Image (cartoon, rainbow, N blue to C red):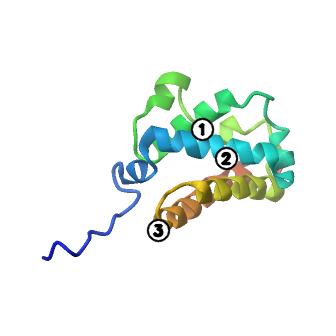
Amino acid sequence: MSNSISEKIIFGVADSSYKAAGEEHGLRKLSTDFYSLMDTLPAAKLIRDMHKDDLELMTDKLTLFLSMWLGGPRTYIEKYGKASMPQAHSKFIINEPERDAWLLCMDRAIDRQSYTKQFKDYLKKQFRFPAEMIRKTSKFS
């Protein structure tokens, strides 16, 4: 096999996605950009209003959750306990507009990162499943 042939990275295997995202540092940047967009996009007001004024704790939680979700360290569990996304969002009304506002912020935050196009597309697709799961399990939907 020639050295000029590059291996195709398969995301979702072991810690490949965590590494592609820049590990914790890269995911902290993604999370910071996500909440910055939530703070400024008019379409995100309905989900921004579900959060406290100070987003520092949420940024940390999202960073550490994504680290674990993408195959990295399980620091979220060590710091915050077991993670159940439906339970964590159970006190909120999550319907299509809320789901779509969340995905809008996340898609734009992903676009701001220096990830490869392949990884950006992969992440955007992966985020649709938990977003929809949370919407479907909302007792208000």
Label 1: few (<14), some (14–19) or many (≥20) C-alpha neighbours in 10 Å: many
Q: Quadrant of residue 92?
A: top right
User: Which residue bears the numbered disc 3?
Assistant: 118
Question: Which of pointers 3 and 1 indicates the residue nearer the eye?
Answer: 3
**Element on which disc 3 rests:** helix
- The answer to whether residue 9 is above or below residue 84 is below
Q: Residue 36 bears which disc, if any?
A: none
Percent position (x, y) of residue 65?
A: 53, 38
The percent position of residue 28, horizontal first and vertical second, equals 55, 39
State the mark number for residue 34. 2
Choose the circle earlier in sequence order: 3 or 2: 2
Circle 3: residue type: Gln
**C-alpha span from label 3 to label 2:** 20 Å
| Left or right position of 26 against 16 | right
Q: Amino acid at mark 1?
A: Leu
* Secondary element type, mark 1: helix
Depth check: 78 or 117 in front? 117
Of 21 and 79, nearer the camera is: 21
Question: Which comes sooner in the sequence, label 3 or label 1?
Answer: 1
Looking at the image, residue 133 lies above or below residue 72: below
Circle 3: is it few (<14), some (14-19), or many (20+) Cα within 10 Å?
few
Left or right: residue 63 compared with residue 134 = left
The answer to whether mark 1 and mark 2 are in CB contact below 8 A is yes
- The tally of labels here is 3
